[in-house]
Amino acid sequence: MGLFAKFKAGLQKTHSKLAHEIKRIVTRSPKLDATAFEELEASLLGADLGTTITDQIIVAVKQAYETQGSAGGNVFAVARREVEKSLASNQPALRKTPGGLTVVSIVGVNGTGKTTTAAKLAHLVQARGETALLAACDTFRAAAIEQIKHWGQRLKVPVVAGAYGADAASVAHDAVTAAQARKADYLFVDTAGRMHTKHNLMQELQKLHRVMGKQLPGAPHEVLLVLDATTGMNALNQAREFNKAVPLSGLIVTKLDGTSKGGMVVAIQKELGLPIKFIGLGEHADDLQPFDPAQFAEALFAE
């Protein structure tokens, strides 16, 4: 399946709800009166696109109708263009430390899919000919270590793990040492899920990062927050709080295939100015894809 087909399939729920609403509004009111614009605004907000980009789309649609009449004001084309423009500054590429190890810390609240995401990222870099290691630094959740070891075996990625209840920072320290000894290109660190409101757990995460930084100056080179798309705009609060505790370098949005609120990707990127690095569009190892603004906008607003 090509990348656009994956985007389209993954955003199917969001797209069909939006397309249905837009078609209904435009068919009923081809000249788009005030009521139609109100309904259009409600449907865009309903997909969790957020107020900023929704306002931007409404203004652009109004402009198109005023200057070109109904023939020139294709709502789908205008919305697609505005979303793509809004996401144009997005830099999805994973950072790479020249000639050395790149450490990527995967953080987030419980249940967003961090462990699976860490494994899929390792798979992704290996598919392009680079080497990767996984660090099992979630030493609290039952079965977290087994889960990452299972992924490691399945994808042929070495895993550095400690015992249950072990100090996560010391596991991270050992993982950095092991990755350096093996001259690996990437180390993906799976951290324990933690609520963004729990101050003590955030301090623990800061400690984990400090320990890695002492072992390898500059580490972690990427701190990626994994967000569950099905939580919609609640994800914005998580992103704000995590960013205060451990400065984030990017976001990964998972479970987009299971929600009709896929617009939250645009809203969060717009609000926080953090790049969306990858999006999760399904269960398989290659369903984590580098984020592509043009293809995302097209899949969201294809007619």
Image (tube, helix red, strand yellow):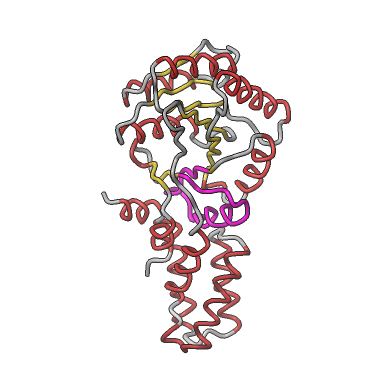
Left or right of residue 222, residue 150 in this image = left
- The residue segment tinted magenta is 251-277
Q: Residue at x 60, y 83 (%)?
A: 34
Is residue 259 in the magenta section?
yes
Horizontal arrangement in the rendering, residue 36 relative to residue 74 (left or right)? right
Which of the 4 image quadrants contains residue 215? top right
Number of residue marks:
0
Residue 175, image x and y in percent?
A: 49, 17
Q: Image quadrant of residue 15?
A: bottom left
111 in the magenta segment: no
- Depth check: give the residue in front, 258 or 89: 89
Residue at coordinates 49% horizontally, 64% vertically from top-left?
A: 83
Indicate whether 70 appears above or below 295.
below
Q: Position of residue 207 (x, y in %)?
A: 66, 22
Q: Residue, x 64% and y 42% (percent of image)?
A: 238
Nearer to the camera, 180 or 259: 180
User: Residue 122: where, in percent of width, then height?
Assistant: 39, 30
| x 41%, y 18%: residue | 159
